[in-house]
Structures are given as structure tokens and as C-alpha cells.
Image (cartoon, grey):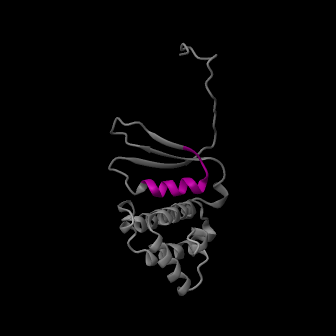
Amino acid sequence: MTDLSFSYYMQLENSEAERVYQTEMENCGYSPFYQFVEQFRTRLKSYTDTEKTHFETLLKRGRRLFPKPGSLSPAWSLLWDEFDSIFRVKNEVLATISEADRDGEWQIIIDNPFHTQSVVCYTELSFYEAAYMYGYFQLELKPNECLRLQKINQLLFTHGSKEASIFPST
């Protein structure tokens, strides 16, 4: 049996190896493809500027080898469109923010000032995680929602304690 990991997929070197990988994956079904998708997503989060071209090749190959992932799960009907969109937006972020400015903590904020829902904030992100999430959340951004990718320049942080609380303990 062929190794169906994403690591192995990244190393496929010819059309025969691709065909064997594709056949094995299709024969094994949902579980290995689920792991493949999750590993692909992890790599989508972490690729860097120097890996863009290679990652684009991996995306195109994935779409070619598995053109209808929705046949394994309806949740994957738009998988390649989702990954392509995140890839495009992440590359825009990489092109906009210089490498010298990428260190430190980043966060994503989603807000709709015309709605009473709470602001959603994802904190303690690396730059590459934040760039991925910026692309991910643009996929379903609703009218009037604002999506922010921002770097934390100064931070005060504390934890609560029972001793300092004015509320009675339960």
C-alpha cells in the first residue's frame, strides 16, 4: 500500500507515481483523504514566500488528481476553490507586509458595527497563521462585517485570581 500522507504527496515526481497515489487514495476513501486534507490545510497555513510557487503546484496537482472531493464528503465540494482563495489572499498579505515586519504576535478581528453580535478576536497568532486566517475568513465575510489583520505592538496581560476578585467564590 502506498503512503497516503501529504508529505508523500509533496514528493511525487512523475505521472505514474501520481496515478498510483490517486488510485490508492480513491480506493481507501474518506479517512485517509480527511487526513490528507487536514495536512494540506496545515501546510497552507505555514508555507512561506519562498514556497509559494511549489505550493501553487501542489494545489493544481490536488485539483487535477482529486477533481471531485465532494464525492467523499459534501463538506469538500468546494475544497479546491476554498484553498485557492485562501492561497490568493495569503499571497496578497505576503506581498503587502515586508518580512522585516512579520515577527511578534498577530491577531484577527471580525466585527460588524451594525449588528449586536460580539466582536470575534483570534489572538496569539504567528504571522503565517494570521495571514491564513485572513484569507479563510474572507470566504464568508458578510456585508458590513470588517475583517482586520493586525500586529500587536504593545501588550499588557494578566490572569485573574480568586484572592483579587470582588465576586464571591462558588
Front position in the image: 71 or 116: 71
Q: Is residue 60 left or right of residue 104?
A: left
Q: Looking at the image, which residue is at 48% across and 48% down?
A: 148
- Our reading of the magenta stretch's main secondary structure is helix
Residue 26 inside the magenta-drawn segment? no
Name the one closer to the observer, 15 or 121. 15
Q: Quadrant of the N terminus?
A: bottom right
Outermost front residue:
1
Q: Position of residue 57 (x, y in %)?
A: 53, 76
Span shown in magenta = 123-137
Q: Nearer the viewer, residue 145 or 13?
A: 13
Q: Residue at x 56, y 60 (%)?
A: 42
In the rendered image, residue 124 lying in the magenta stretch gets the answer yes
Residue at image coords 33%, 39%? 114
Total marks shown come to: 0
Residue 38 in the image: x percent, y percent? 52, 60
Location of residue 96 with respect to 60 vertically, above or below: above
